[in-house]
């Protein structure tokens, strides 16, 4: 029987239209429309499948002998109510071919569950993200297949998957159907894959971090747990945080923030996890550009760490290992001190993007400087010993300072005052003064290494006289100090990241040229959900028969004249083909396609179909064979046939005045499956629906329906009908519109 929905739908629309409009956030053009709530549904299904892993894998392995996992897909191309705006069948087939290329390594092949369905509904077409669009998708979707609705827009998103029993479908805007990764991304959601950055939706890393004390929080404001970089050792949480996979790196939605945090395909900033471990350890230059120490002081007074990222600063509490050491003349490296900075309040530091910063700044320490005395030479100190063979000379010297810049080691002193303490003897000009640089180990009270250089008096010092060597006289540059070369090594303490998040289909890195992939664990999760959805047992495995023959059109042939606008298109059957794509398009007198001309592009079963065209125009048409798994190659399409359309009489299905358009779908349908009668009326009034069999007998009682001006949706329950051919008559005062209806087992 019919379920009359017109009044209910109109009332629902009235409520929706007058409901208060909520402000929509502005999103990156690549943003997926899966909400945090939808994400939880996806993860819950993932965890449920994991709990049932043994049973699901056993069911999968025993279901089929073939190694390929086939999954049925039903595409719904949505047009505006006037039948315009939707994508072509070719766009759908291209997208399905790309989808299978992306899933090829996973052993999954998606096939056409049935011909593409077309829906003329502006409420759904205009924006798939509205509640009224959701209502229609819930009604139009078919059971036990992957439903994909293609609409004009999905406000604020490049597509989305909506889970739950009432929904469980994918919705894509038509402008994103040609993207290599977008539809694959949404299919990943369908099969329980969350975003790699789950929990960071609508949040920027920098904004969240600015609300903390300089380290990523354990939980983001959404309430979800932040994923740690560690994959072992007791601090890992990758099994439950974010996407729930340990073979994809943490990803705090960097790919969806334009180039704020990344360079095209690659994350290029300085984010760290709640423990302070960097996503990209290489942004820390391995050696400081400059560091300083002073005489008799093991602590460094300056250390300029380099941040090589051009995107962002190194935040306070980022963990960096610092190793201080020296290499002797034999080339042996000796570690003097090692520790991790950033792990306590005494070791906070800041380093600007693509810059060097003194993280100690002993002369003017700030809140974001490592506490003076923390980074040291351990048990080692540098010392200076000034001597001369002239026993009457004494010395007063300022503390020596040492600077290492790259491989250049420099000695500095503000001054050395030399005094001749003799009361009788002169010290002649040219007399030598020795400056010995000494590296000592205070723990063993031994000299590790030393080097000596000499200064000569320029003038004779008479008894009691003094001479001061100024700073300019004392500077000495070389490759060593005290006979050794000093070095500091800096690096992140963990180097576990592999950049697997940036090339993963479930991230936002879908820039052209990026490598896209699923991880091994994601593949296993997809297979588990495939088994949980029973796709391996619901349908027989589709025949993977290659098509090798070209189709030939029978009617209308090239050069034909069709006497009536209602035309039967027919062609010869092709071995292996179970469906045929028919493309009809208007052309001008030169045979060139007319822009915005009338046309039809659809897929049907069988070898004929009927379409009404505008009379007194010229058209071309072609048809090419396909089946559930063979649809990517148009090699065997027919040659285009050109024909004219006349209007010598009115056909039986000519549209009457009250009815602007009417349609049945799915058609062919399945026994016991509801058939939707979609009627667009120009008036408010009554109509009657009759169902007749192939010999004209009424097989269901006549039903009166109330038509409201505009779109009307009615459901036909076919439970009492057997498989076969029927005629559905829609009768109004002005006449009757007839539709053929085919029901299959």
Image: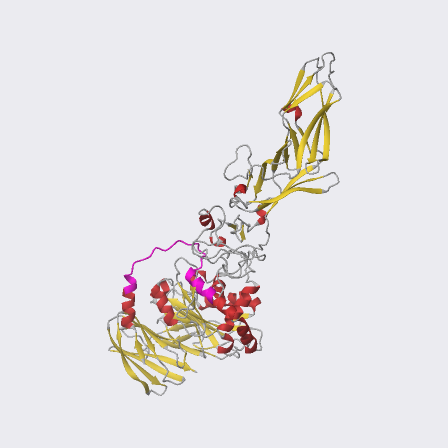
- Left or right: 435 with respect to 266? right
Q: Residue at x 37, y 86 (%)?
A: 694
Q: Nearer the viewer, residue 20 or 528?
A: 528
Residue at horizontal 34 percent and vertical 65 percent from the top = 132
Total residue callouts: 0
Residue 52 in picture, x, y percent from top left: 51, 71
Report the quarter where the N terminus lies. bottom left
Q: In this view, which residue lies farthest toward the top?
A: 424
Q: Is residue 28 magenta?
A: yes
Residue 395 pos. (x, y %):
68, 21
Residue at image x 53%, y 67%? 525
Question: Residue 468: percent from the left, percent from the top?
Answer: 65, 19
Horizontal relation, residue 392 to residue 206: left or right:
right
Comparing 240 with 597, the one in front is 240
Q: Is residue 456 above or below residue 327?
A: above
Q: Is residue 227 left or right of residue 715?
A: right
Stretch of the chain drawn in magenta: 15-44
Q: Residue at x 59, y 48 (%)?
A: 492
- Say above or below: 329 vs 514: above
Residue 571 in sight here: yes
Q: Quadrant of residue 247?
A: bottom right
Is residue 13 covered in magenta?
Answer: no
């Amino acid at each position: 029987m019919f379920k009359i929905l017109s009044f209910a739908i109109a009332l629902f629309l009235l409520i929706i239209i007058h409901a208060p409009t909520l402000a929509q956030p502005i999103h990156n053009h690549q943003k997926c429309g899966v909400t945090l709530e939808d994400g939880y549904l996806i993860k819950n299904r993932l965890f449920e499948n994991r709990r049932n892993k043994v049973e699901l894998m056993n069911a999968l392995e025993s279901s089929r002998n073939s190694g390929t996992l086939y999954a049925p897909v039903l595409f719904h191309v949505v047009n505006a109510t006037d039948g315009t705006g939707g994508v072509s069948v070719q766009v759908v087939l291209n997208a399905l071919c790309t989808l299978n290329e992306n899933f090829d390594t996973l052993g999954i092949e998606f096939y056409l569950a049935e011909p593409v369905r077309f829906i003329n509904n502006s409420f759904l077409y205009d924006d798939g993200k509205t509640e009224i669009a959701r209502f229609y998708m819930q009604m139009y979707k078919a059971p036990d297949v992957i439903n994909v609705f293609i609409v004009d827009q999905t406000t604020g998103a490049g597509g989305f998957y909506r889970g739950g029993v009432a929904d469980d479908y994918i919705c894509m805007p038509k402008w994103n159907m040609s993207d290599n990764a977008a539809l694959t991304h949404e299919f990943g959601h369908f099969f329980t894959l969350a975003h790699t950055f789950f929990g960071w939706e609508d949040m920027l890393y920098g904004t969240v971090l600015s609300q903390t004390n300089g380290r990523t929080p354990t939980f983001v404001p959404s309430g979800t747990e932040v994923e740690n970089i560690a994959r072992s050792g007791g601090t890992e949480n990758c099994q439950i945080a974010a996407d729930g996979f340990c073979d994809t790196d943490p990803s705090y939605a960097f790919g969806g923030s334009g180039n704020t945090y990344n360079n095209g395909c690659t994350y290029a900033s300085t984010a760290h996890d709640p423990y302070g471990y960097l996503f990209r350890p290489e942004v820390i230059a391995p050696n400081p550009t400059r560091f300083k120490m002073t005489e008799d002081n093991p602590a460094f007074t300056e250390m300029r760490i380099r941040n090589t990222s051009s995107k962002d600063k190194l935040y306070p509490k980022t963990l960096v290992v610092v190793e201080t050491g020296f290499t002797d003349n034999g080339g042996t490296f000796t570690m003097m001190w090692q520790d991790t900075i950033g792990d306590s309040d005494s070791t906070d530091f800041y380093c600007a993007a693509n810059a060097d910063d003194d993280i100690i700044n002993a002369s003017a320490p700030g809140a974001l400087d490592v506490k003076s005395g923390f980074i040291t030479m351990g048990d080692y100190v540098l010392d200076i010993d000034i001597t001369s063979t002239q026993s009457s000379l004494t010395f007063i010297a300022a503390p020596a300072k040492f600077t290492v810049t790259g491989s250049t080691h420099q000695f500095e002193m503000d001054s050395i005052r030399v005094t001749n303490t003799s009361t009788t003897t002169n010290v002649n000009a040219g007399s030598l003064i020795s400056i010995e640089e000494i590296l000592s180990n205070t723990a063993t009270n031994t000299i590790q290494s030393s080097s000596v250089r000499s200064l000569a008096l320029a003038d004779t010092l008479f008894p009691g006289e003094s001479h001061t060597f100024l700073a300019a006289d004392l500077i000495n540059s070389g490759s060593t100090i005290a006979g050794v070369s000093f070095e500091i090594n800096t690096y992140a303490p963990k180097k576990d990241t592999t950049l697997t998040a940036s090339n993963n289909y479930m991230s936002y890195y879908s820039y052209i040229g990026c490598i896209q992939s699923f991880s091994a664990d994601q593949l296993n999760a997809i297979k588990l959900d495939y088994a949980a959805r029973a796709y391996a047992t619901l349908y027989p495995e589709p025949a993977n028969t290659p098509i090798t023959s070209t189709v030939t059109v029978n009617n209308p042939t090239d050069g034909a004249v069709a006497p009536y606008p209602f035309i039967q298109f027919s062609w010869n059957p092709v071995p292996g083909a179970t469906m045929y794509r028919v493309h009809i398009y208007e052309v001008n007198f030169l045979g060139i396609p007319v822009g915005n001309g009338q046309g039809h592009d659809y897929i049907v079963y069988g070898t004929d179909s009927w379409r009404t065209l505008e009379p007194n125009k010229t058209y071309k048409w072609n048809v090419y064979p396909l089946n559930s798994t063979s649809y990517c190659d148009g090699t065997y399409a027919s040659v285009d046939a050109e024909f004219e359309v006349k209007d010598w009489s009115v056909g039986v299905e000519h549209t009457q005045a009250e009815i602007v358009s009417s349609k049945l779908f799915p058609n062919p349908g399945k026994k016991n499956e509801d058939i939707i009668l979609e009627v667009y009326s120009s008036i408010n009034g009554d109509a009657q629906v009759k169902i007749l069999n192939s010999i004209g007998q009424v097989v269901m009682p006549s039903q009166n329906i109330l038509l409201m001006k505009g779109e009307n949706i009615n459901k036909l329950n076919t439970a009492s009908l057997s498989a076969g051919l029927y005629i559905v008559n829609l009768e109004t005062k002005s006449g009757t519109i007839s539709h053929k209806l085919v029901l299959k087992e």
